[in-house]
Amino acid sequence: MKIGVISDTHLRESNSPSVQPLKEILKKHFHGVDMILHAGDVGDLKFLNWLSSIAPTYAVWGNMDSFEVKQALPDKRVIELKEFKVGLTHGWGPPWGLAERVRSKFDENINCLVFGHSHQPFNEFERGVLYFNPGTPTDRQFATVNTIGILTVEEGIKGEIIYL
């Protein structure tokens, strides 16, 4: 199973011509994925609808999302993939200690935790859990690189950061 992962798009007008290059990049890298996870700070619900045209899309709201987005999406989810559980949330606070903070949102045993917020890619196993932050494909102010991610679920879960 192949899963496209994205976060921190911060889009205000997902149909504007300036978003078209991002859409082309995502069509290329997310072609053939079984689903897409968006870890918050979506910006525009129409963008999620567009992502759903590629594959079923599951998302959570982030701290910078509008009231409309926060009304439409939960702040966390658990997605079952085969025998694995993937936690999905955005994150909050400073970048240091972020992985531990987001883990505290989940009581249940999870195998992978997908989060965003820091705009920095992160792909590490800690105590048997994969912590995966795809970074941001759009930020040019706080991010040193623009990235998205792919999770592969087979006998285990493996994360890959894609540099754009």
Image (cartoon, rainbow, N blue to C red):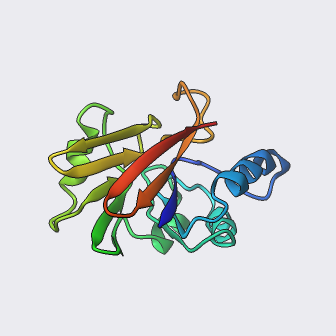
Q: Which of 127 and 119 is in front in this view?
A: 127
Q: Which residue lies furthest to the top in this view?
A: 144
Q: Which of 35 and 2 is in front in this view?
A: 2
For residue 101, say whether it is visible: yes
For residue 13, say whether it is visible: no
* Residue 148 vertical position relative to residue 79 in the rendered view, above or below: above
Which quarter of the figure is the C terminus placed in? Answer: top right
Residue at 63% of width from left, 60% of height from top?
44
Residue 50 placed where, x, y %? 69, 67
Q: Residue furthest front?
A: 155
Q: Is 63 left or right of 57, judged from the image as shown? A: left
Q: Residue furthest right?
A: 17
Residue 160 placed where, x, y %? 46, 45
Residue at 46% of width from left, 70% of height from top?
73
Q: Which of 158 and 42 is in front in this view?
A: 158
Q: Is 34 left or right of 105, judged from the image as shown? A: right
